[in-house]
Amino acid sequence: MKNLHYKDFFWNSDLTCTGGYDAIIQYLNDGKRVCKEVEEFMKARASIEEKYAKDLLGLSKKVCGHNEMNSLKRSLDVFKLQTEHVSLSHFQLAQNMKDEAKKLEDFREKQKEARKKIEQQMDALHKQKASQFKKTMDSKKTYDQKCRDKEEADQNVNRNTNNTKHMEKLNSKAQQAKQNADEADRLYQQNVTTMGKIRDDWMKEHVKACEMFEKQSVERINFLRNTVWTHLNQLSQQCVTSDELYEEVRKSLEQCNIQEDIEHFVNLRRTGDKPPAPVMYENFYSGQKSPTAASPSRLPPPITRRAPPPEPTQNNRDTLYSTVQDAGYSLIQY
């Protein structure tokens, strides 16, 4: 199947019409805007990745499992460390995206400068072509009018053959009309020749411009496709990198031994292997301990009150009595 090319399908039947050329320029301008949009999209994505990386880095510095110990603590330390590494990888991803966006910007500016020279040249040719076409058409009108004037003068000469003086005048007019027509014919032919040369030059430049513009379109489409492809590869690689870093955390968690952590805590913080002795009941009066431990109860042990003091006996002497009933006590007299 034959490939289609700009140079074969963007002509116009009207010599002064630039519709085909304008259609190509419009397409190129749209393509330039697409490049700019993709560029801005990648810059925005890079900004998001950079912000995410900063937030993730800040998160990795927060306290997480500070008071844990042994194998689980090691796993949590790996978890924080790999989170930091993930954040750094996102910083790198953001930088890579910025670099790709810069390449796209440089490519767009390069095409813009290359197009600018061609467009300026073609615009000048279009103006020259339009100006010469108008000049040629005006000279044609003048030529047509002068030819009509010559024919009319010739007819007047042929119709008037009696008056000699009048005939001389008519012949003079006819001769002048012929000269004017010849001069208009010469000028018209000259303008047509110039118009043909300008047309040939414009057609050659139009073909060159079409070939150059088509080449730019091919390069732009290819560059954009490769840029987006690279962008997706970067995102995929980030997923792989993140998964590899997270795998380190999973490996560390596999080494986390629950029983070992329990035993580590016991050995590190143990306080003794014997429980406290039971609390015995002690009688305040007997000074002896109960042979059996007091049963745990929320109620206090019963309290035995002292007996009330005896009534004193009246006699002629002042006496003092002990208030405790005890056979060992005796009367004391003063």
Image (cartoon, rainbow, N blue to C red):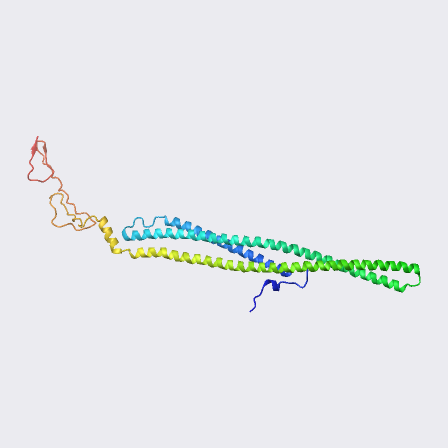
Nearer to us in this view, 239 or 158: 158
Q: Is residue 232 above or below residue 291?
A: below
52 displayed left or right of 17: left
Exactly how many numbered labels are in the figure? 0
Q: Quadrant of residue 327?
A: top left
Is residue 106 visible in the rendered structure shown here? yes
Nearer to us in this view, 259 or 243: 243
Residue 44: give x, y in percent of width and height.
Answer: 48, 53
184 displayed left or right of 276: right
Q: Which corner quadrant holds the C terminus?
A: top left
67 displayed left or right of 201: left
Nearer to us in this view, 89 or 329: 89
Q: Looking at the image, which residue is at 63% across and 61% down?
A: 20
Residue 179: give x, y in percent of width and height.
Answer: 82, 58
Q: Looking at the image, which residue is at 36% across and 52% down?
A: 82
Q: Residue furthest top?
A: 334
Residue 45: give x, y in percent of width and height.
Answer: 47, 54
Q: Quadrant of residue 168?
A: bottom right
Q: Looking at the image, which residue is at 66% across and 58% down?
A: 201
Q: Is residue 281 above or below residue 161?
A: above
Q: Quadrant of residue 162?
A: bottom right
Residue 61: give x, y in percent of width and height.
Answer: 36, 48
238 displayed left or right of 202: left
